[in-house]
Image (cartoon, rainbow, N blue to C red):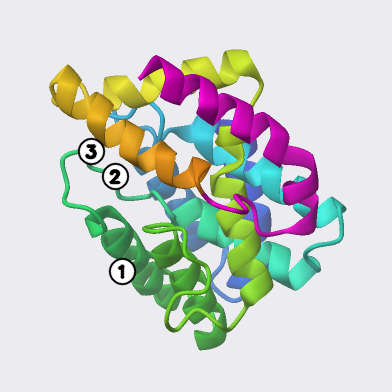
């Protein structure tokens, strides 16, 4: 499924105006076009505008449930935009998130975003490397980190047909990895999530998404 770029760009422009009020439309538009260009790179199969749109919809749901106020929601959406802006499936673990965080910091500063907001977005992007929202240096903007964590992992709780498509997309992104190695690595990753006492950090996601997530994870582990 392809995600049309226009609605996403409109969402970015609306948020950019709030994040970087004085940057002006030309800079907002250039940044949004750059972001969507990265998200639309040909080598991507899962980390695409579809995933970005799902993250933003999950954040909308968490905001509607009262987990985030307007300011926090804005920061969490910015994390969503930048968290996979750099994505190379052959990169060493953590490298994509580090490079995405550096890009976020550099580009947001260039647009005149205030330091405290840049720091919050950077922390959120770095958190997605290990999905440890309590890690060192991640205390500030805890609600933003929790929401970004859950939105990025919404896919684990997707309806069965979407989860099946997600599995296919991930395998296609890692087509360079032999089957045995992929199955072992994938089992290790999703097994770690399945073993967590709590997959989601916000009350809304914990209560509403956990059952589907555990069912999806158990089914995939059985297949592997």
Residue 96 drawn above or below residue 161: below
Check disc 3 and report its element: helix, strand or loop.
Answer: loop
Task: Report the mark closest to the observer, 3 or 1.
Answer: 3
Please state the extent of the stretch shown in magenta in the rendering: 196-224
- Where is mark 3, residue-wise? 89
Residue 30 on image: x %, y %: 43, 53
Q: Dots 3 and 1: beta carbons under 8 Å?
A: no
Check disc 1 and report its element: helix, strand or loop.
Answer: helix
> Which of 212 and 49 lies nearest the eye of the viewer?
212
Q: Dots 2 and 3: beta carbons under 8 Å?
A: yes
Residue 155 on image: x %, y %: 57, 34
Picture quadrant of residue 184: top left
Residue at 62% x, 16% y is: 160
Check disc 2 and report its element: helix, strand or loop.
Answer: loop
Residue 116 on image: x %, y %: 55, 86
- Where is mark 2, residue-wise? 87
Task: Report the mark closest to the observer, 2 or 3.
Answer: 3
Q: Which mark is residue 195?
A: none
Residue at 53% x, 76% y is: 120
Q: Is residue 77 visible?
A: no
Calculate the distance from the C-alpha at mark 2 to the C-alpha at mark 3: 6 Å
Q: Please indicate whether residue 91 sits to the left or right of residue 71 in the image.
A: left
* N-term mark: 3 or 1: 3
- Where is mark 1, residue-wise? 102
């Amino acid at each position: 499924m392809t995600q049309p770029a226009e609605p996403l760009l409109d969402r970015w422009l609306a948020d950019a105006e709030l994040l970087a009020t004085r940057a002006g439309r030309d800079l907002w538009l250039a940044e949004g076009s750059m972001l969507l260009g990265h998200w639309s790179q040909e080598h991507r199969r899962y980390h695409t505008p579809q995933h970005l749109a799902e993250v933003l919809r999950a954040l909308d749901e968490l905001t509607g449930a009262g987990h985030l106020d307007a300011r926090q929601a804005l920061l969490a959406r910015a994390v969503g935009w930048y968290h996979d802006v750099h994505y190379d499936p052959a990169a060493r673990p953590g490298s994509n998130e580090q490079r995405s965080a550096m890009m976020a910091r550099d580009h947001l500063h260039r647009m005149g975003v205030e330091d405290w907001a840049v720091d919050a977005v950077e922390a959120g992007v770095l958190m997605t490397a290990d999905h440890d929202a309590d890690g060192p240096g991640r205390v500030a903007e805890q609600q933003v980190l929790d929401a970004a964590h859950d939105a990025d992992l919404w896919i684990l709780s997707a309806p069965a047909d979407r989860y099946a498509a997600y599995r296919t997309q991930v395998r296609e992104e890692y087509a360079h990895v032999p089957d045995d190695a992929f199955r072992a690595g994938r089992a290790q990753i999703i097994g770690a999530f399945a073993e967590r006492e709590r997959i989601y950090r916000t009350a809304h996601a914990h209560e509403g998404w956990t059952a589907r997530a555990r069912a999806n994870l158990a089914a995939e582990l059985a297949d592997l």
